[in-house]
Image (cartoon, rainbow, N blue to C red):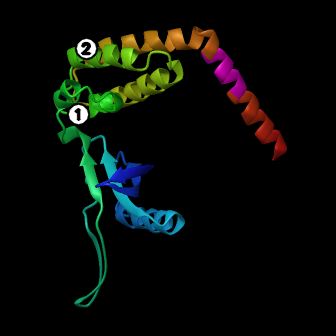
Amino acid sequence: YRVKYKGKKSIAHIEFESGSNNAMADRLLEYHAYLRRKYKLTVISIIVYPFPTKMAESPLQEMLDDEEILIFHFRVFPLWELQAEQYINEHAVVMYALLPTMEGANASLLHKAIDEMVKYYKGNDTKLAEELRWMGIALRRVKTLPRTEKREIQERLNMWDDLMERDPKMRKIRKESEAKGEAKGEAL
């Protein structure tokens, strides 16, 4: 993403990692170098960890004996250590799809988040559907919520899925997308 960070144009490179990966820091460095060369901007590299796992450690250091060859700093963002309620209190709707992965997430809080998402994305059904689907994915993967609460929220998300599937606008968008994909496939 092109962003302004500390008042300067930058690139925010965000990777989601759901499990342990011993080569993650090296892979992130590859992307970092590519993006820096392509855009000629500072790159802020971030790994988002939705679920508890062994995380890559920053900085990545390359040494030759006692000589420092490279130091690559990146950020790690372990969602499970963040407080879900804080994001609700701040009305940080863009983070709501990830709330199920955060500390303190519960059915009551997730219902509130869904209500706010519906208001926030009013008029943009496609974006609402996308965010609710991401919330469903996070919800299904998380192991910290009781089954009854997960089932309750999943039922509500399923209701939205059903409404979106039947919506004429969503059907038209899907049909156009499928047609583009078919045309692309035939061209190959």
Whether residue 32 is situated above or below residue 179 in the rendered picture: below
Of residues 3 and 131, the one drawn nearer to the viewer in this rendering? 3
Q: Is residue 20 visible?
A: no
Of residues 118 and 9, the one drawn nearer to the viewer in this rendering? 9
Please give the range of residues in magenta: 170-176
Q: Main secondary structure of the magenta part?
A: helix
Residue found 28% across the figure and 41% down from its top: 51
Q: Is residue 81 left or right of residue 34?
A: left
Q: Which residue is mark 2?
A: 148
Nearest to the eye among marks 2 and 1: give it: 1
Q: Which residue is mark 1?
A: 102
Q: Is residue 121 left or right of residue 186?
A: left
Q: Quadrant of residue 142?
A: top left
Q: CA distance from mark 2 to mark 1?
A: 18 Å
Return the x and y of residue 125 as percentages of the image width and height. Answer: 51, 18
Whether residue 122 is situated above or below residue 127 in the rendered picture: above
Amino acid type at mark 2: Thr
Residue found 48% across the figure and 21% down from its top: 129
Return the x and y of residue 124 as percentages of the image width and height. Answer: 50, 20
Label 1 element class: loop
Amino acid type at mark 1: Met
Residue found 60% across the figure and 17% down from its top: 170
